[in-house]
Structures are given as structure tokens and as C-alpha cells.
Amino acid sequence: QVQLVESGGGLVQAGGSLRLSCAASGRSLSSYYIAWFRQAPGKEREFVAGRLWSGSTTYFADSVKGRVTVSRDTAKNTMYLQMNSLKPEDTAVYYCAARVGLIGGYPYWGQGTQVTVSS
């Protein structure tokens, strides 16, 4: 079992930045794929970014490419989503999720953190 806890959301003006954290506990993440999703009111949950915990290649949704980076702190077992040049359309609840390997669904989810971008 992997437990995920997101933090770092908040209210920010358009053009601002936020760094979201996804702290994991329960077991080593060395074989896990960690992804960030978001869900805006009235919309379906969408993929934002993801990478293998032990890898270096990160995949980004086109909507955030160039504005978002993903990093990790192995000592803290935490992955970060750095979001810059935020837009009002980035407003959503952001979730991190985990699965073993590159294929399949995500059985582990955090509770989500709200990001609100004002215009």
C-alpha cells in the first residue's frame, strides 16, 4: 500500500507560481509511476504530468507544457509539481496518483489540493 498526501495548493493571481507536493509513505517508490491529475468544476479529471519515480523522463499535457516541471526529493519521499505562469484555466483540484510500472490504472490517489488562479 502507498499513501499519498498532496499539499501546496492555494489562491494565486494569474502569472504567479505554486509548488505542489505529493508526499508518499508506505513503501519504496522505486518501481512506481507517479502522476499528477487535475479536475476542474464540471469537467473530467485530466492528466497533467507524470514520470517514473526512479526515471528522468517526464510527460506533460500539452496544456501545461513549458510551464510545469516535476522534481523529487528522495530523502522526503516527495514529488513536486512546480507550476509557473499560472492561468485562470489552471484552476482545479490537483491530485497525485501512483501505480507500479508504466501501464495500467492508478490504484493509489491522494486527497487532492485546491488551486485557484484569479484573473
Image: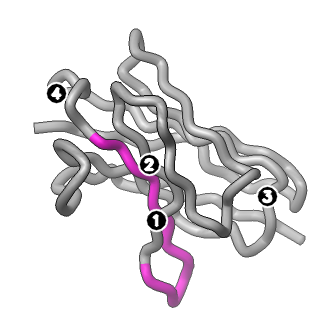
Quarter holding the N terminus is top left
**First-in-chain label (2 vs 4):** 4
| Percent position of residue 84, x then y | 78, 47
Task: Read off the residue under disc 3.
Answer: 86
Q: Do the residues labelled 2 and 4 touch (CB within 8 Å)?
A: no
Residue pushed farthest top? 75
Question: Which quadrant of the view contains residue 92?
Answer: bottom right
Quarter holding the C terminus is bottom right
**First-in-chain label (1 vs 4):** 4
| Percent position of residue 90, x then y | 69, 67
Mark carried by residue 47: 1
**First-in-chain label (1 vs 3):** 1
Q: Is mark 3 on a helix, strand or loop?
A: loop
Task: Residue type at mark 3: give it.
Answer: Leu
Q: Is residue 35 left or right of residue 102?
A: right
Task: Residue type at mark 2: give it.
Answer: Gly
The region drawn magenta spans 33-44
Q: Distance between the residues labelled 1 and 4?
A: 24 Å
**First-in-chain label (4 vs 3):** 4
Q: Distance between the residues labelled 2 and 4?
A: 20 Å
Task: Read off the residue under disc 2.
Answer: 50
Closer mark to the observer between disc 1 and disc 4: 1
Mark carried by residue 26: 4
Residue pushed farthest bottom? 42
Q: Are marks 1 and 2 in contact (CB under 8 Å)?
A: yes
Query: Counting other residues with Cα less than 10 Å from the Cα at mark 3, is it few (<14), some (14-19), or many (20 or more)?
Result: many
